[in-house]
Amino acid sequence: MSIARHKFVPLLLLTFTFAGCQDPLISPDSDPTDLPRPQFAQGDGGVWTVNTLADPGDGTCDDTECTLREAIGAAASGEQIVFAAGLSGDITVLGHLSVIGKDLSINGDGRISINGGKVNRVFEVDGLSDPYTLSLTGLIIEDGDAGTENGGAIWTHGAGGLELHNVTVRGSRAADGGGVYVSNHLMMEASTIEGNIADERGGGLYLANGTASITRSTISGNHSQGSTGGGGIYNGATLHLRSSTIVGNDAHDGSGGGLLNVTDAYLANSIVAGNIAAPAGSENCAEAFMGGDLASLGYTMSEQGRVCGVQAAGDIRLVVGQLLTEVLEKELKDNGGPTWTHALIVRGRAVDAGYCPGESVDQRGFARPVDNQLIANAQDACDIGAYELQGPFVARTDLILSQTSDKTSVKQGDLLTYTVRVRNLGPETAPNAVLINELSSGVTFVSATSAKGTRTTPPLGETGVVTWYIGDLLDQANETTEIRVTVRVKGKTTVTNKASVSSDAVDPNTANNTASLTVSVVAGSTKPPTKGK
């Protein structure tokens, strides 16, 4: 999703208060009947509508102007903030946005980016002594910088919790939790945390305590630079990671490139692979400080020697280096849906190899599970990780054709035999393979034989086309047919046999699907034997 960037540089920063819709410039002694009264609609039904990309505003959220900062201040606990229809773009915050002592939800509808301009944290949630929760939907939170503090883009402390739905957190930096620092509770779904840096621990995400649920999400390209680690996630909570993809994260001088576990972490139907860390064997997952339980609940993919508790039913251990050749694409990009993902390789090892009971969509909101009938199912045809490959599924293969003859030159009346070979170079079965063999007009048909399939041929003694219905040709299989003809032309000329092969599979290399063979015809003839001799 591309969001235009707009920069707002205020000429004067005013002191302002958040007091519902009260104008702080109006004296409390003023007679309200003497003052113009705007037609307020803000706050009706507990919904506040942001109608500008500016920050901070004049301190009042009304229909004339309501900045995001003003709406946050005006909303009561349990209320919602949305953005005016047609409003889209980037809000650069001049100091972090504080959410104090309230439950609050903010829905950007996929149209709004909020950034700290590389100088400010974006959101700070103070739960005080109560477990208040900030719920964010359809937003990009980026370019935050907390300096020597925690949570580059988002910091919840106290008892504060966080919910992320279709949210991207990227390009931010802090001491711990380069992208997000959560003190108490996290619920994250269909979201992406990418390209964040922690000077110490938790490049993408730092979970300090409580519980955390991460579902159908991607954590990619984050870095922790301290000696402890946790390039993707530093986990001090009870973490349940399901149908998610954690790849390409780096713990630099520490351990746990993908996940550093301090308490309990349970993985299911997820990919945790291709991460980097200093100690060998800790590239994907590691435990610190006598950590608790780190286990796969099944259908999780990691790498041999770098495994994340991968030993349950349906788990897959990759050879190092197989992730980008046999599982998914390296590039994190827009593959549809509100947040970016790593697409699966069409015939890769994660396809139909998972199990995701109760899920109906993947991270992008696309249908799940989707059965690829060309691949055997591990359980319910769900793909492993955050991305579900969509149909229709067409086999991809490379057919190659060659032919030889039993003579390099012939005379009129000679019997000539062509051997035509079809091979499937794979990687999948070529369904309904068919060979079309066009005889030269200088020969007549005698016979055709093969060990597999059926044929249609010209009548005996006539020229025409031999069609060989080979059927399904397995990966690396090859089949041959012998076609016998009689040369009927005389003199110095040639006869050329032309053949081509195809199937119902997609064949990206059709240059080797045809072959021609030319045989010289020399002077003279081979007379048939005299009857009775």
Image: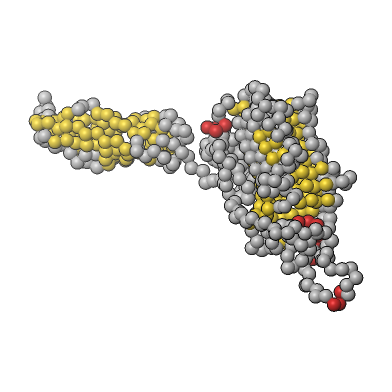
> Is residue 3 shown to the viewer in this render?
yes
Q: Position of residue 21 (x, y in %)?
A: 81, 65
> Is residue 135 shown to the viewer in this render?
no
Of 319 and 73, the residue lying toward us: 73
Q: Quadrant of residue 269?
A: top right
Of 242 and 370, the residue lying toward us: 242
Q: Position of residue 306 (x, y in %)?
A: 65, 25
Residue at 71% across / 57% down in the picture?
Answer: 55
Residue at 88% across / 75% down in the picture?
Answer: 31
Q: Quadrant of the C terminus?
A: top left
Residue at 64% across / 32% down in the picture?
Answer: 250
Q: Quadrant of residue 438?
A: top left
Q: Position of residue 429 (x, y in %)?
A: 46, 35
Instruction: Tell me if 422 is positioned left or right of 516 in this view.
Output: right
Instruction: Tell me if 278 is positioned left or right of 448 in this view.
Output: right
Q: Position of residue 224 (x, y in %)?
A: 68, 33
Q: Quadrant of residue 369?
A: top right
Looking at this view, name the residue that lies furthest to the front: 11
The colour scheme used here is secondary structure
Q: How many callouts does the rendering have?
A: 0
Looking at this view, name the residue that lies furthest to the bottom: 34
